[in-house]
Image: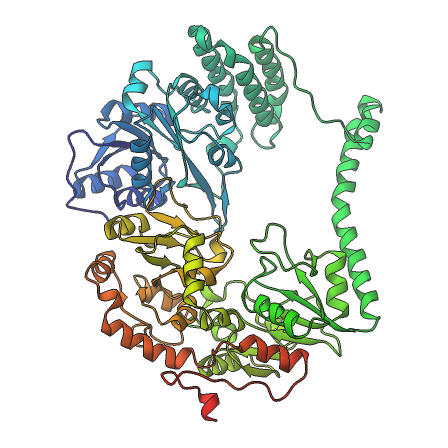
């Protein structure tokens, strides 16, 4: 949505330069990502580099709707570098930001950049983070992110943090103070690799540099690749660009000590261009190699010593002793052998698993997993802890990937997915407990017991109910799903509503354990001391009102995008509130994070969501199943449903959140702020809605769910403790 009433500033804080050529499919997304920012003191200089498509018309359209947009129409195509120069010539802002026209700014990014600049005294250069987004929906982070996370906290020069040279040589991950750029006369050259003679001199010359450890840009990786991945002799431009880099060093002897590091970056870069298939025409490869050797000889410092390299393996050393004409063949054979290693190991592991299945199932053994082996958490962890208390004779194994936020207690065997230990546990353990499914290759043996704990009460459609929602179903294969649910012996449920849904969504022969969710026992049994302890761990003052923002995953978003400018929201709430932000586990690592000094505390990596519940005074969510758990605390819940119709159409839901809501439901950021600033978030209407919600969806949760599961499944007791609830939420099970 394009703002139409934004005022043009005489000297805007930012001049955002967007050159475009042949990107009409992406240009609107790019411009919208800027114009929808909550920070509004900027101008956009959109430069049409004589694009053959509708880019120029789109720019004129946006300029007509928003006075902050200036459309610059070039009569001839001059290339990316000179198009940026044309934008700089029109810039009036204190800082320059470059944004490629197929990339986007994340919500709240300009506000975070402005805040960081103010905190660090308006440095000449600010470097921020980015993520790559792919045509198939994948998102990958900056592989050199540690350069930002481990850098100096204040301002510095490159001498104090030379690791900045390792970052991608691009223009769009920085904000440049315009007077700094003009004082040095920095401009972009023509040709390919135009960022190289811009990036390195800028880094070397800046007296004050600051870092922002926040993802501000989504860098689109188009399926057909960038212009730099195309086959062309234009790749020879790289030699001229590095000549410009070293010419800058020659003209400024005070930077002579950077010749060695820049030489190493050049040698690496030239090697990449030479080695990557498809960049150089076949007939030009020998010429490029000769030019590379000439460039290395011309720019190598007189006292330069080659860095020591890691020793070669025995196989590589042996290949080097062979006659030159057969070395390439030997090296290809070596690489082929390495590729064979993984499939051979897979075959051997499958044979090992079949062998283990011929041995008896071991009684009093159990294997646990949660969230596709990502963590020690949720219902499986709660059952495991109660099992250690009530049946300590049961030997337990947990399946965990490396890097889990939580680890099981001492004495628990931990195995990695797909390892020897994993397949042995799958073959020999009597009890299998998971909140999702184990791999399809796992064979359910006679004598084994599978407990499916699930991981939430379903608002969104699940299982076979997704057949009419292809976006929500995604790559879920129904035949495979049926094979997996046929392995279940028990399915745990928190309420009668969920029991009915599981029976329809997962049609198979299993027993429903209408016991409540074990992970919620800690919430039902929590004391004020537990709440104070949780807030203390987070450093929250006793007088602060805490809002926990926890949105769910969007199947319809190929790239996860925030639907709420949380920093703007937190700013407007004021000092009386602390806002905690926790992204969905599917989206870990894709969010923008929180800038230093931000009013938002990023708790996505916090090991216990239950502790966050206890610390919070209010849950702000959308359609996440967290609302059903948090309702047990009888604290306010606010629903931000700004994409309800899209979500319902693409994923499908079992009820209308506007009709059966745990609190106020709003659809715009303005209404959301009004709910909080007016105090309605915790009024009587909210309390009444929450009470009705608890009666329906917190039906079996009385604080003893884990005990019931352990006694019924592991101790084989039929008379488990009955559900006993407060009078305001009677249990259908108790009414019998």
406 displayed left or right of 660: right
Position of residue 505 measured from the top left corner of the image (x, y, whole percent):
51, 77
Residue 221 seen by the camera: no
* Residue at x 57% of width, y 68% of height: 382
Who's the residue at 23% across and 25% down the image? 90
Residue 689: percent from left, percent from top: 29, 76
**Residue 672 on image: x %, y %:** 25, 60
In this rendering, is residue 511 above or below 88?
below
Q: Nearer the viewer, residue 380 or 180?
A: 380
Q: Which quadrant would residue 729 be assigned to in this image?
A: bottom left
Please tell me which residue lies in front, 156 or 401. Answer: 156
Above-or-below relation of 195 to 254: below
| 50 to the left or right of 354 | left
> Image height check: is 633 above or below 642?
below
Total marks drawn? 0
Q: Residue placed farthest to the front in the image?
A: 529
């Amino acid at each position: 949505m394009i703002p139409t009433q934004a005022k043009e500033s005489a000297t805007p804080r930012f001049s955002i330069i967007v050159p475009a050529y042949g990107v009409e499919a992406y240009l609107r997304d790019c411009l919208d990502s800027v114009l929808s920012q909550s920070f509004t003191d900027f101008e956009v200089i959109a430069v049409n580099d004589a694009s053959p498509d509708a880019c120029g018309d789109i720019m004129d359209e946006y300029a007509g709707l928003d006075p902050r947009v200036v459309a610059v129409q070039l009569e001839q195509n001059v290339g990316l570098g000179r198009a940026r120069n044309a934008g700089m010539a029109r810039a009036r802002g204190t800082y320059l930001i470059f944004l490629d026209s197929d990339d986007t700014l994340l919500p709240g990014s300009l506000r975070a950049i402005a805040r960081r600049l103010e905190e660090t005294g308006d440095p000449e250069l600010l470097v921020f983070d980015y993520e790559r987004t792919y045509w198939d929906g994948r998102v990958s982070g900056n592989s050199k992110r540690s350069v930002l996370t481990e850098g100096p906290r204040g301002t510095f020069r490159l001498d104090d943090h030379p690791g900045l040279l390792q970052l991608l040589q691009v223009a769009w991950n920085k904000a440049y103070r315009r007077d700094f750029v003009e004082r040095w006369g920095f401009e972009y050259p023509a040709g390919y690799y135009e960022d190289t003679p811009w990036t390195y001199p800028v880094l070397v010359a800046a007296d004050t540099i600051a870092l922002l450890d926040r993802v501000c840009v989504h860098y689109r990786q188009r399926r057909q690749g960038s212009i730099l991945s195309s086959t062309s002799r234009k790749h020879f431009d790289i030699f001229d660009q590095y000549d410009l880099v070293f010419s800058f060093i020659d003209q400024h002897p005070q930077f002579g000590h950077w010749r060695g590091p820049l030489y190493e970056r050049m040698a690496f870069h030239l090697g990449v261009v030479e080695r990557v298939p498809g960049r150089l025409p076949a007939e030009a490869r020998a010429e490029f190699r000769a030019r590379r050797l000439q460039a290395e000889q011309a720019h190598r410092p007189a006292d330069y010593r080659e860095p020591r390299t890691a020793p070669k393996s025995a196989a590589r050393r042996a290949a080097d002793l062979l006659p030159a004409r057969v070395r390439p063949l030997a090296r290809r054979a070596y690489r082929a052998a390495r590729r064979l290693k993984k499939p051979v190991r897979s075959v051997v592991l499958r044979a090992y698993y079949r062998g283990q299945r011929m041995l008896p199932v071991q009684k009093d053994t159990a294997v646990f997993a949660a969230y596709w082996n990502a963590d020690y958490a949720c219902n499986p962890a709660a059952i495991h802890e109660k099992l250690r208390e009530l049946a300590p004779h049961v030997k337990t194994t947990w399946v965990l990937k490396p890097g889990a936020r939580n680890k099981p207690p001492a004495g628990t065997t931990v195995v990695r997915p797909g390892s020897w230990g994993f397949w042995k546990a799958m073959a020999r353990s009597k009890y299998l407990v998971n909140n999702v499914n184990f791999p399809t290759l796992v064979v359910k043996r006679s004598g084994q017991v599978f407990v499916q704990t699930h991981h939430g009460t379903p608002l969104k459609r699940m299982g076979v109910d997704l057949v009419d929602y292809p976006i929500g179903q995604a790559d879920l294969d129904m035949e495979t799903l049926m094979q997996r649910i046929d392995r279940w012996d028990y399915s745990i449920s928190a309420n009668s509503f969920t029991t009915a849904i599981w029976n329809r969504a997962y049609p198979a022969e299993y027993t429903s354990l209408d016991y409540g969710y074990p992970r919620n026992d800690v919430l039902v049994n929590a004391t004020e001391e537990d709440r104070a302890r949780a807030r203390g761990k987070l450093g929250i003052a006793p007088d602060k009102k805490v809002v926990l923002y926890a949105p769910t995953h969007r199947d319809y978003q190929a790239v996860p995008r925030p639907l709420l400018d949380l920093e703007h929201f937190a700013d407007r709430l004021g000092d009386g509130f602390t806002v905690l932000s926790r992204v969905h586990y599917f989206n870990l690592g894709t969010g923008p994070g929180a800038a230093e000094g931000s009013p938002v505390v990023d708790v996505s990596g916090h090991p216990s969501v239950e502790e966050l519940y206890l610390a919070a005074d209010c849950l702000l969510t959308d359609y996440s199943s967290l609302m059903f758990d948090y309702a047990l605390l009888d604290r306010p819940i606010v629903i931000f449903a700004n994409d309800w119709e899209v979500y319902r159409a693409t994923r499908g839901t079992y009820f209308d959140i506007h009709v059966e809501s745990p609190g106020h439901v709003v659809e715009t950021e303005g209404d959301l702020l009004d709910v909080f600033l007016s105090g309605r978030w915790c009024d009587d209407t909210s309390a009444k809605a929450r009470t009705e919600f608890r009666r329906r969806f917190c039906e079996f949760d009385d604080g003893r769910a884990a005990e019931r599961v352990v006694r019924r499944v592991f101790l084989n007791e039929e008379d488990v403790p009955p559900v006993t609830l407060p009078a305001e939420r009677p249990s259908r099970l108790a009414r019998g």
